[in-house]
Image (cartoon, rainbow, N blue to C red):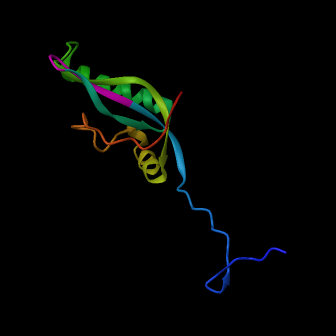
C-alpha cells in the first residue's frame, strides 16, 4: 500500500501549473537602413494587427518619403527587409496596437539607433 509523502507534517500537494500570460498573434515587419558608402544594417521592426494594416503602414511610409524627397534616392534611407511574419506578443503590446489602429502599426520602441536593436522575444512564423 502506497503512502503519501508528508511535508512539514502535512500531506504533499500537487504543484499548480504556472500561469502563463495571454499572447496574441500580430504581424511583424523587419526594416533595414541603407547608407551610401556604409552598406545595410538592421533598423528595427514594426508591428501591425493585420496584413491590411501592414500594407497601409508601408504605403503611407513611402508616400511620406516621396513627399519629402521626391523620386531621388537619398544617401541614407530605411526600407522593409524580408517578408512580414506572424509573431506572438503580450496583451500590453496588443492593446497598444489596438489603440494605434488608425496609424496601422507602430515602430518598436528602440527603433532609432537600433543598428544594435533589442531582441524581439517572440517566435516568428512565415506567413
Across the whole image, how many numbered discs are drawn on residues? 0
> Residue 34 magenta-drawn?
yes
Judging depth in this view, the residue of 15 and 59 nearest the camera is 15
Residue occupying image coordinates x 30% and y 44%: 109
Residue 73 lies in what quarter of the image?
top left
**Is residue 6 positioned above or below 67 on the image?**
below
Q: Is residue 28 left or right of residue 21?
A: left
Horizontal and vertical percent for residue 14? 67, 70
> Residue 79: where, in percent of width, then height?
30, 23
User: In the orientation shown, which residue stands out farthest toward the bottom?
Assistant: 9
Screen quadrant of the C terminus: top right
- In the rendered image, the vertical position of residue 27 relative to residue 100, given as above or below: above
The location of residue 37, given as percent across then percent down, is 14, 16
- Residue at horizontal 40%, vertical 38%? 105
Q: Residue at x 63, y 67 (%)?
A: 16
Region of the chain picked out in magenta, as a range = 30-38
Q: In the displayed structure, does residue 110 sit left or right of residue 101?
A: left
Q: Main secondary structure of the magenta part?
A: strand
- Reply yes or no: does residue 96 show up in magenta: no
Viewport quadrant of the N terminus: bottom right
Residue ranking furthest to the right = 1
Q: Quadrant of residue 55?
A: top left
Percent x, y of residue 26: 49, 39
Amino acid at each position: 500500500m502506497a503512502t503519501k509523502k508528508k511535508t512539514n507534517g502535512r500531506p504533499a500537494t500537487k504543484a499548480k501549473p504556472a500561469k502563463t500570460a495571454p499572447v496574441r498573434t500580430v504581424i511583424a515587419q523587419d526594416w533595414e537602413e541603407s547608407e551610401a558608402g556604409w552598406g545595410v544594417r538592421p533598423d528595427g521592426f514594426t508591428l501591425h494587427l493585420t496584413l491590411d494594416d501592414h500594407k497601409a503602414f508601408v504605403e503611407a511610409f513611402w508616400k511620406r518619403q516621396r513627399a519629402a524627397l521626391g523620386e531621388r534616392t537619398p544617401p541614407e534611407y530605411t526600407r522593409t527587409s524580408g517578408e512580414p511574419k506572424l509573431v506572438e506578443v503580450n496583451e500590453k503590446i496588443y492593446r497598444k496596437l489596438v489603440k494605434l489602429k488608425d496609424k496601422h502599426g507602430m515602430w518598436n520602441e528602440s527603433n532609432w539607433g537600433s543598428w544594435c536593436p533589442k531582441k524581439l522575444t517572440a517566435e516568428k512564423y512565415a506567413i
